[in-house]
Amino acid sequence: MGTGPFAVPSFEAIRQAGYEIPLVVTRPERVRKSRKGPPPAPVRQWAQSHDLQLFDPASINDPEAIATVAAQNADVLFVCDYGQILSDAALQAARCGGLNLHGSLLPAYRGAAPVQWAMWKGETETGVSVIHMTPKLDGGPVVVRRSLKIDPHETAGELEARLADDGVAATLQSLSDLALWDGNSAWGEIQDPAQACKAPRLQKSDGQIDWTQSAAQIDCQVRAMQPWPTAFTTLKSEGRADTRITIRSLEPTDTPRAESLACGQIVVEGQTLFAAASDRLLQIHQLQPAGKKAMAAADFLRGHPHVNKAHFAS
């Protein structure tokens, strides 16, 4: 059961390992808002490329959907990046219930956006976990856990791709361990609820930069918002209309913020663009004005010589 790209490496590993896949359950196709329409979801595309039977109920917890899954007589439901929470009745549709591959070191960052929240909160390490599922969101016993260092320069999209690849080993190990489980004894490590924290689905508003944060916090936010919803701010310049600016890439410097500089104040040195955080200056490498393509800071400065008297507003 899956929909998004995080699931595909592990699903393909399951297929290549020779496990029988009687059914692939995925979310329904999105409604077309244009003639071209949205691209197929990654798991749907993967299943179609291997002629696997697809099932896309509006709700996996509807009795008819549960009956369809139960009719497969499957040993286990392997769930990753699916987008729906399975009820107890749905989990009972397979003999051994469900296994779920999740992109964090559970119980930390339970929810739909664990990779993004771990980066946004400044974690230096994250990983993947496979749990034996319960109806509680990401709350089942952990049967496999693998950790991974977060590169201080990577984006959430880049980290998610690395975690998806690392999830392959965890996936295959969990299925091997499942084959040895007697079905009755305790299996896995019970999660400590005191260590749990949530990672809800991101909203577009989460990308708005608060320049009163530290340089490190802003850097983490900008990287966590890539590729979606992206980090943004408002360029304010006297006598000119406000402009929404998407910040694509920046980097904290060692230069402390002078007391004379307000948070968000822009500093230009030659063809180099800086903005003041609460503690230090940030060098902005790439940005994108509304309605324009992403561009290097030097290219932006050539077309906006007035910005040395402007500031970014939170």
Image (cartoon, rainbow, N blue to C red):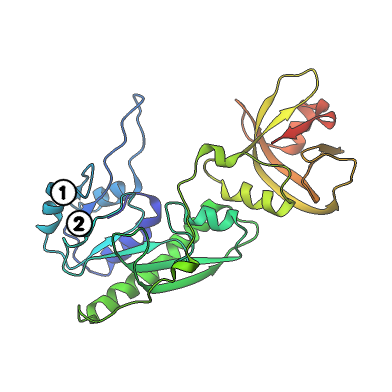
Q: Residue at x 79, y 29 (%)?
A: 302
Residue at 20%, 81% (x, y): give it.
182
Q: CA separation, marks 1 and 2?
A: 8 Å
User: Foreground: 49 or 88?
Assistant: 88
C-beta proximity under 8 Å, tags 1 and 2: yes
Q: Amino acid at mark 2?
A: Ala
Q: Residue furthest top?
A: 239
Q: Quadrant of residue 90?
A: bottom left
Label 1: few (<14), some (14–19) or many (≥20) C-alpha neighbours in 10 Å: some
Q: Is 131 left or right of 149, judged from the image as shown?
A: left
Q: Judge left or right: residue 205 versus residue 8.
A: right
Q: Is residue 230 visible?
A: no
At 42% across and 54% down in the image, what residue appears?
Answer: 111
The location of residue 247, given as percent across then percent down, is 65, 39
Q: Is residue 27 above or below residue 22?
A: above
- Relative vertical location of residue 193 with respect to residue 262 in this rendering, above or below: below
The residue identified by callout 2 is 90
- Give, as a three-letter code, the residue at label 1: Ala
> In this image, 128 relative to 252: left or right?
left
- The residue wearing badge 1 is 65
- Quadrant containing the C terminus is top right
Residue 164, horizontal then vertical, whole percent: 43, 60
In the structure shown, which secondary structural element does the residue marked by tag 2 occupy? helix
